[in-house]
Structure formats: C-alpha cells, structure tokens
Image (cartoon, coloured by chain):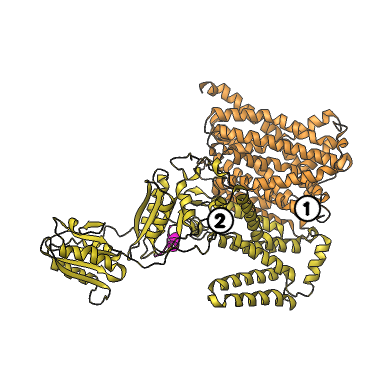
Amino acid sequence: MFPFLKSKNQTKDNNKDNSQKVLIYKEVEKNNEYIRQLFFAEKNKDFSFRTLTAKYIQKKVHIFFYSSIVNSEKIYNGIIRPLLEADGQSIKDVITIESLTEIKDFDQVVNQINSGKAVIFIDGDTTAYSIDVAEFQARGVEKPENERVVKGPKEGFTEALGVNVSLLRKRFHNHSLIAETALIGTRSKLEVSLMYVNDLVDQDILKNVRERLENISADNVSSIELLEQYIEERPYSIFPTILYTERPDYAAQFIEDGYIVLLMNNSSAALVLPATFWSFFHSSEDRYARFLFGNFTRIIRMLAFAITLLSSATYIAVTNFHSEMIPPDLLLAITSARERVPIPLFLEVIIMEVAFELIREAGIRIPNPLGPTIGIVGALILGQAAVEAGVISPIIVIVAALSGLTSFAIQNTSLNPSVRLSRFLFIFCASFFGMLSLVAALVIWVLYMSSIKSFGVPFFAPLSPHFKSRGDIYFRNVIKHEFWRPGQIKPKDKRKSN
Amino acid sequence: MKKTRLKSRELFAIVVVVVGFKLADTTPAQYAQEGQNAFWLMPIISFLVIFPSFLLLMYLLKKYKDKNLIQLMMIILGRPLGTITGLVVFFIAYGLLIFDARNYADQTKLLYFPESPTPVILVIFLIVTFFGAKRGFQAIGTSTFVTLPYLKLSVFMLAVLIIQKVVWLRIFPIFGEGLGTILWEGAKRGATFSDLFIITIAYTAFKNGKTFSKGIYFGALFALFEIVFFFLLYTTLYDYNSIDKTAFPFHDITQYVNFGEFFTNVETFFMVFWLGAAFLRFIILVYLASWILGEVLYMDEFEPFILPLTFFIFPFSLLVENTILNELVWRNSLFIIATPIFILLPLILWVTAKAKGDLKKQ
C-alpha cells in the first residue's frame, strides 16, 4: 500500500573487487615513497615515520604510524628498541609486542595504519608487518546515564571497543563467546564487533546480520546509533526493531541466551538483535530484583505504559463524546474548571502535551548550571500561570503531567519515543469519533506491531506466535524455574540448566 | 498459502472472537423472538444440529492432508461443481459479513453516536478492516491472541457485575414456548456457528491438522459455553416479557451495571472492548472471505481481494433500508437459508468422496 513502509534491502555492491591490489615492493625506498604519497606525509602532521637499521639483519627498516592514535611508549619499547638492540632469526623473534600480522599489499597497509597499527617495511622483503600499538583516546568506564538501576551493576559501555568487549567477556567466561569483526564503510573502514556464543546462536540470523553489514555501502558509519539505522528493516516504522542498551550486564544476559550483540568504537552502547517487544519493555533490573518485587515493577511499568499511551486520548474521547460516562460530581468539577477556558478541549490537551515535550526536549539540551532554574520557570509558567490566566484548565495539567511523567517509566531509549509518538496519534484519533476512532487506531496499532519482524523474529514472540521460552513475557518466572532459552531466536541449545 | 507460525492458541482466540462475539450482537435478540425465556437453550440445539457436519468436514480435511476448505471441495467435487459450491460458501460468508457490518454500524450509531450518520461510522469500520486485514494472517492471529485476554476480562467483569442482579427462577418454564418450538427454531439457526466452517479455509496455514483441530474444537466449545452463559444471563435478567423487545441485550446490560457507587455509567468502558472485538472479527472475516474467493478463482495471491471486498461491503450494506429490515428480515433469512447448506455440504463431500473411493486409499 505504501511502498516506502516496506522493508528495503540495500543491495548495492560493495566495491570489493574493483581494485587491482598494489603489492608491496621489494625495495624499501619505493615503498617509502608510495606510502608517503598515499598519506600526504608532507601535509599530514601526525603521520609519522621512522627509518632505522635493524641490528638482527643489518638492513634498513621503515616504520609508519599515526602518532595521534598510537601508544608511543609501546612503539619505543616494543618496536624501536628491540630493532636497534636485539638479535634474532626473524622479525618475529625481535619484536616484543604480542600481535604481529603479515601483510602483502598496500590496501591492507592503509587499513592497518588507519586503525592505529604501526607498519614495518624491511628492505628486500615483500611482506610488511603490522603491529598493534593502537591507543585511541576514550573516557573510562562510567555509570550508564539513561538506564539506571537501584539494584544491579553500575558499569556502562564506553566509547572504546576493546573496553566494551572486555566488559562483556568479564560477564560470560566461555571459550565459545566469539567477538567476530566486520569492517564497514567504504571511505573510512571501521570495525564492528559481532559478539555471540557460537554454540547457541542461530546460524541463519547470524548470516543475515553479516549480510546486512556487508551490504552497507555508506562512506562512513561512525557509530552504533547510525549502524542501527543502516541495518534495520523498516526505517519508517515507529517501532524499533533493534535493542539499544548502554548496560553491559543487560547485553550479556542476551548473549547468554543466544542473541547477537554488535559493538563499535565511538558508541557507549551496544545493539542487541533480534529484538522483540518484550526486550524493549523489560529492564535489566527486573531480573536483579527478587521475584515478587521484580514483577511488581512490571505491573507498574504496564500501568505506566497504558497511562502514557492512552490517558490524554481517553480524556478527550470521554469528555467530548461520552460525557455520560463521567460521574456527575466529577463532570461538574471538570465543567467548572473549564468554564473560563476559551479554547476547545482537544487544543488544550495538544497545547499541554506539546508543552511537556518542549520542556523535556529543552531539559535535555539545557546547559547543566541552568537546568533547575529553567525547569522551575517552565513548570511555573506552564502549570501555575497558564491555569491562573485561564488559558488551560487545571485538570488538563493533571492529565498531561500524568501522561508525561509515566512516559519515563518506559526506560528503553528506543521504545520511549515510539510510545510518545503513538500517544499523539491516539490523541488525534480520539478527537475524531471518541472511543470509536480511538479503538480503531488501537486495533490497527496492535496489528501493525504484530506484523513487525526483527531479523525474522515476530515482534510479540514468544507470547504469540508461541515459542518455548523462559516464560519472561508479562511477568518473569522464579530464576530457578527458567528452563528454556527463548525459542523464537532458535538457539542451538534450547534447554537451560539451572 | 504459506504456513504461518500460528498455533492452536491463536486459532482458539480467532474462533472465540469470531463465534463468541455472537453473544454481544443481535443474535440473542433474534433467538429471543421465538424462544422467549428459554432462548438460552437454543444455541445448544443450533450447535448440536451443525456440529456433526462440522466433525465430518474436519474428518475429510484430515484425510486429504494439507488441503483447505475450498481445495477440498475442488478435489472431491471436481472443478466446475467445486467452483459453484465454493461461490455459494463465499456468498454466504460475504453476505453475513455485509449484514453484520450494517448491524454493528447501526448499533454503534444508535447507542453511542446518535447524531452521526451510519455511513460515516461504517466507513470507519471498513477503514480499520482494510488496514487490519492487509497485515496478513499471522499478524491477525497474533493480535487476536494478544488482545483476547483483555476482551474476555471485560466480559468476565460484566458477568460478575450483572450476576448479582439476575433472578434465577426466571428460567422457568424451562422450555418457554414449548420444547417443539425450541428445537425447531434452534435448529433453524444452526448458521450461528457457520463461521466455524469458514475458518477451515485457514486449515493449511497451521502447522498440522492436530494443531488446527485442537484450536478449533476448544474455541468452539468455549464460544458455545460463553454464548449459552450470556444468553442465560439475559433471560434471567429480563424475563420473557422484555427479552424479545430488547434489541441489543449486551449493550443493555452494560447500562445496568455500575462499579460501586461512584462509577454508575460504565457502558462506554465495555463498549471499548466490544468495539475492539468487533473490529477484530471483521478483519478476520474479511480476510477469510478474500481467501475463499481467491481459492475459488484459483488465484495464488488473494490479498489483493481485500480492498474490493472491503469496499463493496459499504454500498451493499447500505442498500438495506433500515436496521429493523436488516436484522429481522435479511440477516435472519440468510441464517435460516445458510443452515441447511452448511449441514449438507460436508455430507455431500463425504458421500462423493466415498463413492469415488478416495477415503479408502489413505
């Protein structure tokens, strides 16, 4: 019906096989010249190279690297000093740094230097050697900003890939936890780490993910947030299909069950896929809290979900179209509150809802020192003063505040905007034909959600279509009674041991 | 049609929504015209009359593996006869849909939007139906299953609230007008459960015959129980004097109940769930009707039929002059005509299959 709503497969070919690879020359000077041309060595101030004579073979050696993204201590202690001082048969005996890769052509040389490696050319040798001395600047491990918990670990992902991988490995010690690397981007090649447990993950899904990563033909995909938009199926949909989380512990929970986690440099978050409605709806703390309290939180969240979606819309529908439903006393209260208000009810609700969104948006962008001041002014002006001036009725303030506040109970940063957008949709619908059009919109909304798939997994699975799972849907089970891994992602080992 | 991932539970939900919804539309009013205070017994008769045929149909479907209702007819009766009977089934299904559409639109208008014109309400119904049905059978099944608990919770709540107000002795005289009337009039309306036959078009969409039969049997029994229970509630609440004058018993009882002293007019609350169920029922039936038509016409893709079929409900259902005619003449007649057809159809199929010797092979 709407072609743009359908999923589009990006089928552009990667320009993989277009280049005839330039192999490394035997003469070190030729290599030297070629590299310096490639990297504009004259202009590029942080492109460094060093020439020296290696003691172990008595030949000239050139080392190239970006000084801004390597650890200079490591270069000195691990490469230069051994080359100058040590004896040995081959370069492998000389270099003390743990990783040493042989490379044959200049494409690889460029990739390696760009990703923070030092590349060594030896005179008379057609193989170059790349040594990992990368040190990209990043902040340390801090608390996740947007997904706070009371009970549970406080570490968050950070913008360094290595640290993120380490945070996940720390939580799941298993030899089959794999951190596979894929390179994406044509101009700037960045690493994406696919982490999964090899003997759990479904190979079809894994293949699907790999293909989508390969099919990205963008020049540069610099972070996981952008990557999400490149690999998702329905870019126009209001629902997310890939889980975005800042919490390594939450991501590790998914890895254990056979999901795939994507990590990248430059993003303090991970992508978990395939995602279902439930993975957005749940929070990691639901499992850390004991059984009863965890489920109590779920009830509260469901309530919040319903209130934030429907309270304003229901208010419009009921007061405009079904006022007989309101008890007389309450109806009188509403009417008397609205007595002085000149604008129609629908407009009133829209004004307040938009105002709340404005405060919210401004609150995020506001410079830290000003935050509280502006917050108070906003609340005072929009709440108190607007009511006293007779522009809006006090009841609307209650309704809007309720629906605004409860929206924060949907913690997930991907689902939250969906819910807020849907709320406006429902408000518009409710103003047409009251409950009739509201229910109509709701039915279509649910049907739309049911038709979404994330990497082949239906959005409401395992509730419907049914799959064997640990029963963590509306409510969670006692941890000891969780016997199955989520069947919708077809883990190779379905049975969990407890 | 490809297999979907749906299982018995989704089919159960579909059956309960499609068949069980009869408790909340004008079906009870039609029954009550004849049965008076014993009309709650009539659905049991209707069910008993039509169920053996249904069992026979299920038996045939099981024998001819991986065939749905129309494919089965085509195989057994041959293409020309199969097409004709297929078209008959389609026209009954679509006809019931047309009258139901008018019926629901009129109910909604009369009870909740007295100032809105029926066509406008009908248009809203049809828009939802179209967009919903377009999402495919798996999405329909999933949504029905996901929403069913809320729908049933509201009905259960209504039952709990109303049960304090009923007078159980009103079921007497137990056979109302007389046993003969109950049996005959009940039997005439076997088509109340005709939707069960229509749902068998989706036989191939489920994993296997067992999944399907489990879902449809449990669904049918639950729906029957629900219908009988609610009819009983209507009887005991209204008594014979007023029951045959009540056009929309379900909506009327929602006006009787209240949540405590404070919330006294809660009919809109129940109307929300009623509407949700009505929308879903419509979406399912339109989808199934297009499916039937697609199979009859040997089309690989039947989903393009959804748009025209949904659209034509609009002019056809407005052809009827008014609600009363729609209800008491047209819909009622179609029920009575459809009953023998649905009873005989599986029998004909079975006899032909037997004569051809198809049943021995498997």
Among the chains, which one is yellow? Answer: A
**Residue beneath disc 1:** B267
Task: Tell me the colour chain B is drawn in.
Answer: orange
**In the image, residue A323 above or below residue B207:** below
Query: Which contiguous range is marked in magenta?
Result: A222-235
Same-chain status of marks 1 and 2: no
Marks 1/2: CA distance? 43 Å
Is B184 left or right of A428, judged from the image as shown?
Answer: right
* Residue drawn where x is 67% and y is 70% of the image: A352
Give the total of numbered labels. Answer: 2
Image x and y of residue B326, in percent: 76, 46
Circles 1, 2 touching at the beta carbon (< 8 Å): no
Q: Amino acid at mark 1?
A: Glu
Q: Give the farthest residue toward the left.
A: A58
For this orientation, the residue located farthest to the right is B241
Whether residue B159 is visible here, answered yes or no, is yes
Tell me residue B273's x, y (percent): 70, 50
Q: Chain of mark 2?
A: A
Amino acid at dot 2? Lys
Image position of B61 with respect to A126: above or below: above
Query: Can you tell which of label 1 and label 2 is closer to the viewer?
Result: 2
